[in-house]
Every structure is written in C-alpha cells, then in structure tokens.
Image (spheres, grey):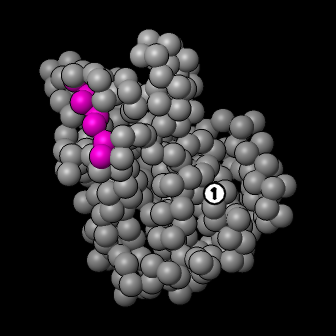
Amino acid sequence: MDLGVRDRNFVLVGGTTGIGFAAARVLASEGANVALLARDPERTRAKAASIADEHRIRAIGIPVDAAKPGDGVERAVADAAEALGLLHGLAVTAGPMNRQGVFDEHDEASWEWYFQVILMITVRACRAIVPHLQRNGGGTIVTTAAYSVRAPKVTIAPYTAMKAAVLSLSKNLAKTYAADGIRVNILCPGLFDTEVNDFIRDQRAEQYGVPLEDAIYTHLASNPVWNMRVGLERAGRPREAGELIAFLLGDRAAYMTGAAINIDGGTDF
C-alpha cells in the first residue's frame, strides 16, 4: 500500500529510539525525507545517517533538548525546513517514563519533570510546526498519549496525567486547525518493548526462564503492581507502532483527525 508520503518532509521529535526511530524508518522506506530531533548530538546524527544510507532519501539529525523552555525546538524545526524544504508533518514520540510510585510519593520535582518531558515537549513541537504547515496549505501531526489514559496505573499518576493532557491538547489542535488543512491524531500505545529495556532484558529472561523476546512482557504481566496482561500475550514491536504513525501522517488517513487510537495488543479490553 502506498501511504502517500513519498517526497514529503517530516519532523520526528524523539526520532532516534524506539517507536520514533521505527516511524522514521517506515517513512523513509516509503520515500519520505525525515528530520530527527533528539537530545544526544552524536546519536541523532548517526541515526539520521543510517536512515539516509539505508533508504537513499534525505535524513538529517538536529540535536535539541525539547524538554527545556525556550525557542530551541522552534529553531530546530526551522533548521529542518531549511535543510529539507517545505514541511508536511510532525510526529512527537518523546515522553519517557521515569520515577514511579503511588500518588503521595511524587513530589513537585517529579510532577515538573513529567510536565516538561511529556506535555511541554508536545506543546513546543506543535507550536513550532503549525506555522510551517499553514504556509504549506496543510499537513499532518501525530502525538503520543498512552493506553493508560483510559486505564490508569497507580504508580505513574504524573505520567498518565500528562499523557491525558497531550490527548486533550491534540483534540483541541485538531479542531483549531482543521480549516487550515491540518490533521492531528493521537497514538495511544500499550506495552512496547524497546531498547530502553536492554539493560534488564537478560536478567528478566533468566529470572523467568523465558526467551529474551518474552522477558519484558512476562515480567510486567507477572508483576502484581503492573498486571500488564495483553490479549496477544506479547509486547508490541516498535515497527508496529511506527507503521501506524506513518499511515496517520500520509494520505491514506485523509479523513482522520482528532482520533485517539489504542495500539496495545488487547490490554484492558
């Protein structure tokens, strides 16, 4: 299926790891050009170079810490436009999970951290891209919430609250800019096994006596706090979410906007 992204230019915030990098690779495989925005300068440029070499498209890496207040993201998006040309879309996949604990274990610093790395990264990225899409006569945006906005976990109240705010913000943007031809949709991932788990995968595989590819799911499904039981009985693979992001950014999803889409393998039906 032709996704309708060939020769178009997309910005991916958080595009050097996990779901974001997978989405960048899918877009590139469909003939799109990509700008990867992330904090680590060396990794950002290396990942962009690897995509360019693999798919023979234009890919650039632009280092920026989108969690810091200021105009850094705006300048990075402007640099992407200068390097690639007219911008056609944005995917925001940044938004990690860090400190965990029940509600009264999260202090002001914890809430502020989640506010900056989840909600404000999305705000800054969307604020930076919208003028470019307006000048181009329209475009597409995909943000990342989480399936847990519908099924909260007690140990990640700040994370879930900020992901719910991303969902609300995105629906607002979909209404605000529909007349400008800008579509905004929201990805709500469940359990995905990405390289963030690399440091514990061997340990969990040995602990439960399972293959490496089953280690993280087995641990989270067995843990009474998380109880992450998935209908498909496995964790998601980054490319599976990357393909959905690429679909939402392309012409095949031309009548979709404001949609919040679970991709969770059947978690909490």
Q: Is residue 35 above or below residue 86?
A: above
Front one among 20 and 183: 20
Question: What segment is highlighted magenta in the picture?
Answer: 225-231
**Residue 62 percent location from the top left of the image:** 69, 50
Report the front residue among 73 and 151: 151
Q: Nearer the viewer, residue 5 or 205?
A: 205
The secondary structure type at the circle numbered 1 is: helix
Instruction: Find residue 2 and report its horizontal and vertical position in percent.
Output: 62, 79
Q: Residue at x 43, y 40 (%)?
A: 235
Q: Is residue 53 left or right of residue 176?
A: right
Residue count near mark 1 (Cα–Cα under 10 Å), binned few <14, some 14–19, many ≥20: many
Q: Residue at x 37, y 55 (%)?
A: 263
Determine whether, in the image, residue 13 is placed left or right of residue 158: right
- Near-viewer residue (7 or 1): 1
- The answer to whether residue 30 is above or below residue 240 is below
Examine the structure image and report whether residue 245 is included in the region drawn in magenta: no
The verdict on residue 230 being magenta is yes
Q: Which residue is mark 1?
A: 24
- At x 40%, y 32%, the residue is 217
Residue 47 in the image, given as x and y percentages of width and height: 73, 45
Question: Is residue 13 visible to us here?
Answer: no
Q: Amino acid at mark 1?
A: Ala
Q: Can residue 242 be seen by looking at this rendering?
A: yes
Main secondary structure type of the part rendered in magenta: loop
Give the vertical position of 10 relative to 196 (above or below): below
Seen in the picture, residue 224 relative to 11 is either above or below; the reply is above
